[in-house]
Image (tube, rainbow, N blue to C red):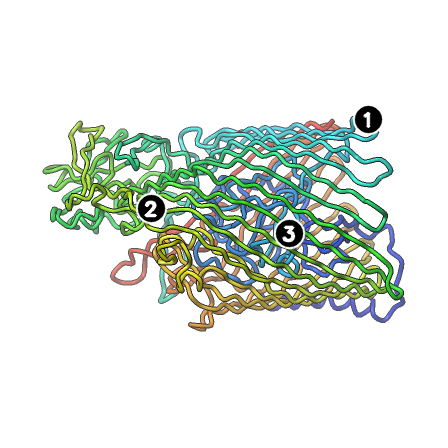
C-alpha cells in the first residue's frame, strides 16, 4: 500500500514540476469543465480554483454501480470513513480525516440538501442525518467539502459538509426507469423531468417509488416507500438572479442491519478470516423476519401496544425558498429558507450473538433486571414458525434489544442570509461576504426497548425463542413471545426514556478575500450561539412509587399462558431540565496560488466547534435549574483544528486528458462525549494526519477514476490507533464506452483496522462491483449491475468479537456485514 501511495504522488509530482518550468498556458478545450462550488465556499469559484478540499460526484459517475444505501453513495468521496453498511434506511457512522466516530452517527459531518442542513446535528440519537435524505434521479450532484471552510461557512460541521444538490431544469428533458433485483426481491421506479416554462421560468420534478424484500432477502416487503422532490425557478430580469421554491415529501421504510454475525477465526489478536454460521449467512441475514414483523411494547402510560418492526421509517415534508439577487454587478444578496416537518420510527431487533449453551443455566434476572427472581433458564423453545414448540438446539442464539423509538418531532426551521460585495483593490479584486444563519431543531423522542431472545439458525427468518425453567420446554414459562422484560435492555439505563427538547442555533459569519493575479487568499470567522430548552424523563423499575419492582402480565401467543414480566417505565419526575445557552468562535484562513491554468497549490488552516446537544441528556450534565453543570460544560462543545496543503494538476497525456490532486492534512480534536446507549463516556484527544489523492484519466472511450487515502490516527491518551480506522482506503473505477455499449467496474477496499474494543484486528478487505450498459437507441438504456461480484463475506468496521472459545481460536463477530452478491437489471427511457 505504501508503494501505491508513492505511485500516486509520483504521477502528481511530474506534471506539476513541468508546470513550474513552463509559462502558464491557456485552458484548452480538453480540460475538464468545472462546476461552481456552492457548498461551504467563500465565493463563487470552480472546484479547480478553490482553496478547499472539495469533491463533486455526479449521478452519472455512480449510477452504473447502483448503490444499495446512502453509505455506498458517500464511499465515492475521498477522506470519509464510513463504518457501517446498515442498510437503505441509513444509520451509517460517518467519520472524516482520521477523526473517529466515538458514539454514533456523524458528529463532525453535516449532510445538507441544497445548502441547508438536513438536521442541525449529525449524531442525533436514533435520528442520524442520513435517515432523512435519499439519492435519486432528482439529484444533480453530491458535493463534499472536507475541513477548511466548513468550520466557518456551516454550523456544527468542522469536519466536512456533504451537500445533495438538486436539478433545477436548466437542462430540459427527463427520464423514467425501472430497476429490479434478479437474485433478490426489490423493484424501484425512478423518474425525473425538467423543462422551461417560457423565457423566465423553469422547473424540475423527480423521485422514486420502491418495494421489495431488500438485499437481505427477508420474506416480505420490508422495503417500501417513495420520495417526491421538485422545484420551480423564476429568473429575474436582466440576468440579475433568481427566486426558487423547493418542496419534498419522503415516506420510506427499510430494515437497518446493525449486526450480521459470523464466525471469526482468531490468531492471537488477529482475525484471520470469517465463515458462516450453520444455516445462517451473514451476507443475507437480518434480525427481522416474518415471525417478528410485530412486537409488543410497554407505553409510558402502562398500556401494552403492538407495533410494526419497520426498521427506519422517516416521514419528511419540507417547503423552502431560495433567492439570489444582484443589486449591482458588485453587490449580491443570497437567502435560503426551509421549513421541515420530520418524524418517524426506529424499530429493530438487535442481534447480540451468544452460544446457546451459555443461556442454559443462566439466571433469568441477568436479562430482566429483576433481582428477586432467582430462577434459571433450563431450555429455549421456538415461540413461532413451523418449529413452534420444539426445543431450540442450534449452537448460537440471540439475546438482543428489541427497540421501538418514536421520533415524535425532529422537525426544523432554517434560514441562511448572506450579503456579498466585490470591489477593486490595489490591482486586485476584494470580496466580502457577511451572513446570518438561524436554525431551530426539535428533538422529541420516546424509547421503548425490550430484552428478547431470537434464533440464529436461519438466514431468512429470525424466530422468537421462549425460555423455560425446565429442560426440553418444561417447567415455568419465563418469557412471553420471546420477551423477558419490557424496557429492560442496555443495563436498564435506557429502555423507557422520553424527552422533548429544542435547540436554536444562531450564527453570524464574515468572510474576506482578495485575488491578485495568480494569488487568491481569504479568511473567515463565525460566531455560533446555541440556546437549549426542554425536559427529559428516565426509566425506573418502580414507576408507581410503591416500593415494589414493577411487573405486568403478558399473554404468550403460542401457549396462551400469562407471564409476569418485569418492567422499567418512565417516571413522572424529570431526570433533566434543560435551559442553557452556550457560544463559541470558529475561524479559517486559506490561500491558493495558480501556477498555471492547469496547476495550482493551496493551503488552509482552520478551527471549528460543534455542540453535543442531546448527547448531554442523562449524563449528569445539568443543574436543577437546567443550566449546565461543570461536567456538562466540559462536554458541551468539542473543537476540531485542521491544517492542509494541496496541489492540483490537469493536462494531456498519451492522447487523453487527466486530473490529479492531492491533499496532505493534519487534524486534532478534543473529544468529550457521552454515549447513553452504552453509558460510556469519551474524554480524550485525537491527532491524525494523512494524504488524500484523487485522479481521473480519459483516453478515447476509456475512463478511470480513483482515489487512495492514507490515514495515521492516534488517541493521545493511549497512543493507539482508534477503532475502525484503516490505514489505507482506496477506490479504482475503470470503465470503457464502446458507443452503444459500455462496461465498468469499481474496486474498493481498505487495510486492517481494530475492532471497537481495540482487542482484535480485522483483516483487510476488497470488494468489486461491476456494470454493463446497452443503448440500442438514444432514448433507451438497458443495464445490468452486480454489487459484491465475488460474494465476499466481510466487514468494514465498528463491530467486535464476542463469545470467544476456550482455545481462543474462534469467536463471533458482531457487526454489519457487507451485503452478498446482488444482481439487478434496469431499463431507462430518456426523453
**Which of the 4 image quarters holds residue 153?**
bottom right
> In x, y percent, where is residue 128?
49, 46
How far is disc 2 from disc 3 in space, using C-alphas?
38 Å
Classify mark 2: residues with Cα within 10 Å, few (<14), some (14-19) or many (20+): many
Please tell me how crowded label 3 is: few (under 14), some (14-19), or many (20+) other residues with Cα within 10 Å: many
Percent x, y of residue 68: 54, 40
Q: Position of residue 589 (x, y in %)?
A: 69, 65
- First in residue order: circle 1 vs circle 2: 1
Residue at the spot 45% in from the left edge and 32% down from the top edge: 213
Residue 823, by quadrant, is top right
- Quadrant in the picture for the C terminus: top right
Q: CA distance from mark 1 to mark 2?
A: 56 Å
Viewer-closest of 720 and 697:
720
Mark on residue 493? none
Give the residue furthest to the front. 625
Determine the secondary structure under disc 1: loop
Which residue does the image show at 77% across and 34% down from the upper left? 171
Q: Secondary structure at mark 3?
A: strand
The circle drawn on residue 537 is: 2
**Residue labelled with disc 3:** 144
Q: Alpha-carbon distance for marks 3 and 1?
A: 34 Å
- Residue 526, by quadrant, is bottom right
Residue corresponding to mark 1: 198
Nearer the N terminus, badge 3 or badge 1?
A: 3
Up/down of 543 relative to 184, above or below: below
Q: Is residue 389 left or right of residue 719?
A: left
Amino acid at each position: 500500500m505504501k508503494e501505491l501511495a508513492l505511485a500516486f504522488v509520483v504521477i502528481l509530482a511530474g506534471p506539476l514540476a513541468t508546470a513550474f518550468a513552463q509559462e502558464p498556458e491557456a485552458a484548452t478545450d480538453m480540460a475538464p469543465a468545472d462546476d461552481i462550488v456552492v457548498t461551504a465556499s467563500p465565493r463563487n469559484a470552480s472546484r479547480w480554483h478553490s482553496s478547499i478540499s472539495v469533491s463533486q460526484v455526479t449521478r452519472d459517475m455512480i449510477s452504473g454501480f447502483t448503490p444499495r444505501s446512502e453509505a455506498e453513495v458517500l464511499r465515492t468521496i475521498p477522506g470519509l470513513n464510513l463504518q457501517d453498511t446498515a442498510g437503505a434506511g441509513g444509520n451509517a457512522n460517518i467519520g472524516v480525516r482520521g477523526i473517529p466516530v466515538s458514539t454514533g452517527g456523524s458528529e463532525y459531518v453535516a449532510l445538507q440538501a441544497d445548502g441547508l442542513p438536513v438536521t442541525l446535528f449529525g449524531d442525533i440519537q436514533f435520528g442520524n442525518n442520513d435517515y432523512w435524505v435519499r439519492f435519486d434521479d432528482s439529484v444533480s450532484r453530491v458535493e463534499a467539502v472536507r475541513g477548511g471552510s466548513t468550520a466557518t461557512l456551516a454550523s456544527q460541521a468542522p469536519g466536512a459538509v456533504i451537500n445533495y444538490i438538486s436539478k433545477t431544469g436548466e437542462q430540459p428533458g427527463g427520464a423514467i426507469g425501472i430497476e429490479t433485483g434478479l437474485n433478490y426481491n426489490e423493484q424501484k421506479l425512478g423518474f425525473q423531468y425538467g423543462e422551461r416554462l417560457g423565457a423566465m421560468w423553469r422547473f424540475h420534478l423527480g423521485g422514486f417509488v420502491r418495494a421489495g424484500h431488500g438485499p437481505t432477502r427477508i420474506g416480505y416487503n420490508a422495503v417500501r416507500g417513495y420520495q417526491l422532490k421538485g422545484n420551480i425557478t423564476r429568473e429575474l430580469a436582466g440576468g440579475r438572479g433568481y427566486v426558487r421554491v423547493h418542496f419534498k415529501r419522503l415516506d420510506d421504510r427499510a430494515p437497518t442491519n446493525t449486526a450480521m454475525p459470523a464466525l471469526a477465526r482468531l490468531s492471537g489478536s488477529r482475525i484471520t478470516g470469517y465463515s458462516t454460521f450453520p444455516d445462517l449467512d451473514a451476507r443475507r441475514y437480518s434480525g427481522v423476519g416474518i415471525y417478528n414483523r410485530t412486537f409488543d411494547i410497554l407505553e409510558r402510560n402502562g398500556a401494552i401496544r403492538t407495533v410494526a418492526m419497520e426498521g427506519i421509517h422517516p416521514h419528511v415534508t419540507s417547503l423552502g425558498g431560495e433567492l439570489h439577487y444582484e443589486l449591482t454587478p458588485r453587490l449580491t444578496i443570497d437567502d435560503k429558507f426551509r421549513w421541515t416537518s420530520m418524524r418517524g420510527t426506529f424499530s429493530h431487533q438487535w442481534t447480540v450473538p451468544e452460544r446457546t449453551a451459555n443461556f442454559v443455566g443462566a439466571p433469568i434476572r441477568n436479562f430482566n433486571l429483576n433481582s428477586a427472581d432467582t430462577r434459571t433458564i433450563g431450555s429455549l423453545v421456538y415461540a413461532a414458525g413451523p418449529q413452534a414448540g420444539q426445543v431450540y438446539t442450534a449452537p448460537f442464539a440471540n439475546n438482543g434489544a428489541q427497540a421501538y423509538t418514536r421520533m415524535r418531532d425532529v422537525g426544523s426551521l432554517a434560514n441562511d442570509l448572506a450579503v456579498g460585495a466585490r470591489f477593486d483593490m490595489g490591482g486586485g479584486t476584494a470580496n466580502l461576504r457577511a451572513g446570518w444563519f438561524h436554525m431551530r431543531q426539535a428533538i422529541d423522542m420516546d424509547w421503548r426497548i425490550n430484552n428478547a431472545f431470537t434464533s440464529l439458525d436461519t438466514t431468512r427468518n429470525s424466530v422468537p425463542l421462549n425460555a423455560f425453567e425446565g429442560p426440553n420446554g418444561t417447567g415455568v414459562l419465563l418469557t412471553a413471545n420471546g420477551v423477558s422484560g419490557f424496557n429492560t435492555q442496555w443495563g436498564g439505563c435506557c429502555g423507557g426514556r422520553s424527552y422533548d427538547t429544542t435547540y436554536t442555533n444562531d450564527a453570524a459569519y464574515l468572510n474576506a478575500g482578495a485575488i491578485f493575479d495568480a494569488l487568491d487568499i481569504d479568511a473567515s470567522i463565525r460566531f455560533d450561539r446555541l440556546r437549549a430548552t426542554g425536559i427529559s424523563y428516565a426509566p425506573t423499575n418502580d414507576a408507581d412509587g410503591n416500593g415494589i419492582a414493577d411487573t405486568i402480565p403478558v399473554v404468550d401467543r403460542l401457549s396462551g399462558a400469562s407471564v409476569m414480566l418485569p418492567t422499567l417505565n418512565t417516571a413522572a419526575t424529570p431526570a433533566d431540565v434543560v435551559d442553557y445557552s452556550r457560544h463559541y468562535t470558529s475561524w479559517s484562513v486559506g490561500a491558493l496560488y495558480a501556477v498555471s491554468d492547469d496547476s495550482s497549490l493551496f493551503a488552509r488552516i482552520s478551527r471549528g466547534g460543534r455542540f453535543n446537544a442531546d448527547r448531554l441528556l442523562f449524563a449528569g450534565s445539568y443543574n436543577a435549574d437546567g443550566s449546565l453543570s461543570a461536567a456538562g460544560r466540559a462536554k458541551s462543545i468539542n473543537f476540531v483544528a485542521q491544517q492542509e496543503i494541496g496541489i492540483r494538476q490537469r493536462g494531456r497525456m498519451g492522447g487523453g486528458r487527466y486530473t490529479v490532486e492531492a491533499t496532505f492534512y493534519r487534524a486534532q480534536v478534543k473529544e468529550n462525549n457521552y454515549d447513553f446507549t452504552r453509558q460510556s463516556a469519551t474524554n480524550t484527544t485525537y491527532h491524525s494526519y494523512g494524504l488524500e489523492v484523487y485522479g481521473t484519466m480519459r483516453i478515447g472511450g476509456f475512463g478511470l477514476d480513483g482515489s487512495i487515502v492514507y490515514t495515521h490516527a492516534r488517541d493521545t491518551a493511549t497512543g493507539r490507533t482508534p477503532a475502525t480506522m484503516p490505514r489505507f482506503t482506496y477506490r479504482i473505477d475503470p470503465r470503457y464506452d464502446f458507443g452503444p455499449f459500455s462496461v465498468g467496474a469499481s474496486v474498493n477496499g481498505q487495510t486492517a483496522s481494530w475492532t471497537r474494543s481495540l482487542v482484535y484486528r480485522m483483516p483487510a478487505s476488497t470488494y468489486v462491483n461491476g456494470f454493463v450498459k446497452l443503448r440500442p437507441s438514444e432514448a433507451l438504456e438497458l443495464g445490468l449491475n452486480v454489487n459484491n461480484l465475488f460474494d465476499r463475506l466481510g466487514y468494514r468496521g465498528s463491530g467486535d468479537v464476542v463469545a470467544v472459545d476456550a482455545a481462543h481460536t474462534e469467536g463471533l463477530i458482531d457487526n454489519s456485514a457487507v451485503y452478498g452478491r446482488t444482481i439487478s437489471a434496469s431499463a431507462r427511457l430518456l426523453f
